[in-house]
């Protein structure tokens, strides 16, 4: 069987404006949680954002941590932070410095510092996955690992990428269109071999993640990769697996697949990025999906950091408010914004 993902679902999570306004206008008119006094960010107290970005050219990590602390958030898991190119990528060391500065500032301000944790992407520095580098970062104190994302073959196949990632002579601004699958495989990372099985080096990395019991995020894996990973994780009795932005074009899950994955113990992390104008997912459809699978294996996060987005704390207010407006109650929001993120980060123990 071919590994080309052309036979996978290509759902359209957007809803025409003429239809969307029918559901959105009653919701926006009815949702009245209280007056908002900018720049305060109400309603995010205790929330943990398990997917935010703060690398070069994006939001400043320390400034964001201060905003999170001022608004009594539980904490931030940085998917990316500091420089991800050039020097060796050691995000936990960067976050250690942020945490130290934040404590000094919060002590002076008389505030409780929001938690700050580091995640590690196994190809975030655009080098092939390395079990040795993964173990170094686990020893540094990372609490989560991301499989390939922007340089995954699936990303290049769906939206293209910067040619300089695989051709050092290319102009830094040169961005391709979607690549043919064979070219995407050649230029990007893919987790399966020619027989559709996990590559041995990837299986070893997954075993190391399970041994360390840190959270695992699937990145932009195809459906075939997702189910191959789930099969191994089930054998390893691993309980901290997460699929980000299920409605994104890279993941592209419909509700039956979401149900199948949550039944296998995999968490679904819905994001503000999906609701933003850049992806345009209908919040009513996101709510419908959460209601269909239940909140037991659902989280909400920002996936924010780029200058086109609000800051991550504000994105947490937005995504949680949308879901509250459509029908998630306070107890359910507590589960998806605090309890489940705490479980994934190992804080509940």
Image (cartoon, helix red, strand yellow):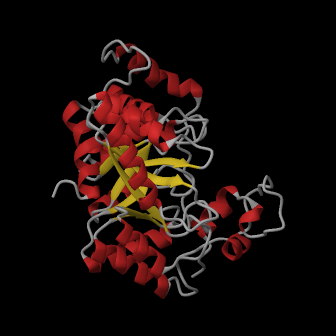
Residue at 36% x, 33% y is 320
Which is more toward the observer, 87 or 232?
87
Residue at 23% x, 43% y is 335
Residue 193 point in image, percent of width and height: 55, 85
Residue 118 in the figure: left or right of residue 339: right
> Can the viewer see residue 223 in this picture?
yes
Residue at 65% x, 58% y is 158
Where, quadrant-wise, is the C terminus in this rendering?
bottom left
Where, quadrant-wise, is the N terminus in this rendering?
bottom right
Residue 295 in the figure: left or right of residue 5: left
Q: In this view, does 196 lie above or below 284?
A: below
Residue 107 in the figure: left or right of residue 142: left
> Can the viewer see residue 254 in this picture?
no
Q: Is residue 335 above or below residue 328?
A: below
Which is more toward the observer, 153 or 137?
137
User: Furthest-left residue in view?
Assistant: 349
Q: Is residue 113 above or below residue 341?
A: above
Where residue 101 sits, quadrant-wise, is top left
The number of discs equals 0
Residue 179 point in image, percent of width and height: 74, 64
Residue 311 point in image, percent of width and height: 49, 34
Residue 120 in the figure: left or right of residue 33: right
Where residue 126 sits, quadrant-wise, is bottom right
Residue 30 point in image, percent of width and height: 35, 15
Which is more toward the observer, 245 or 121?
121
């Amino acid at each position: 069987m071919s590994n080309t993902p052309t036979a996978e679902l290509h759902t359209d999570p957007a809803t025409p404006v003429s239809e969307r306004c029918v559901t959105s206008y009653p919701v926006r008119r009815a949702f009245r949680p209280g007056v908002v006094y900018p720049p305060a960010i109400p309603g995010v107290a205790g929330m943990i954002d398990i997917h935010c970005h703060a690398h070069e050219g994006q939001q400043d990590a320390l400034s964001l941590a201060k905003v999170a602390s001022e608004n009594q958030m539980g904490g931030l898991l940085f998917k990316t932070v500091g420089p991800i190119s050039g020097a060796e990528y050691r995000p936990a060391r960067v976050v250690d410095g942020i945490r130290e500065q934040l404590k000094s500032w919060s002590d002076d301000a008389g505030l409780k510092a929001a938690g700050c944790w580091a995640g590690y992407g196994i190809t975030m520095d655009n080098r092939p996955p390395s079990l040795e580098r993964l173990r170094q970062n686990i020893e540094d104190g990372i609490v989560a690992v991301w499989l390939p994302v922007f340089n995954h073959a699936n990303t290049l196949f769906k939206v293209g990428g910067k040619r300089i990632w695989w051709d050092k002579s290319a102009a830094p601004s040169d961005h391709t269109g979607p690549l043919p699958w064979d070219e995407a495989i050649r230029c990007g990372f893919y987790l399966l071999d020619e027989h559709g099985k996990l590559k041995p080096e990837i299986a070893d990395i997954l075993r190391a993640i399970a041994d360390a019991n840190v959270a695992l995020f699937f990145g932009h894996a195809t459906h075939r990769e997702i189910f191959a990973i789930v099969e191994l994780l089930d054998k390893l009795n691993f309980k901290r697996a997460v699929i980000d932005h299920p409605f994104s074009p890279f993941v592209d899950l419909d509700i039956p697949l979401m149900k199948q994955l949550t039944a296998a113990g995999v968490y679904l992390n819905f994001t503000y990025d999906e609701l933003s104008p850049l992806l345009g997912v209908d919040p009513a459809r996101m709510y419908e999906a959460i209601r269909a699978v239940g909140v037991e294996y659902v989280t909400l996060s920002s996936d924010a950091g780029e200058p086109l987005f609000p800051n991550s704390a504000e994105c947490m207010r937005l995504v949680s408010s949308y879901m509250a407006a459509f029908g998630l109650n306070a107890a359910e929001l507590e589960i998806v914004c605090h309890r489940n993120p705490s479980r994934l980060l190992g804080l509940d123990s």
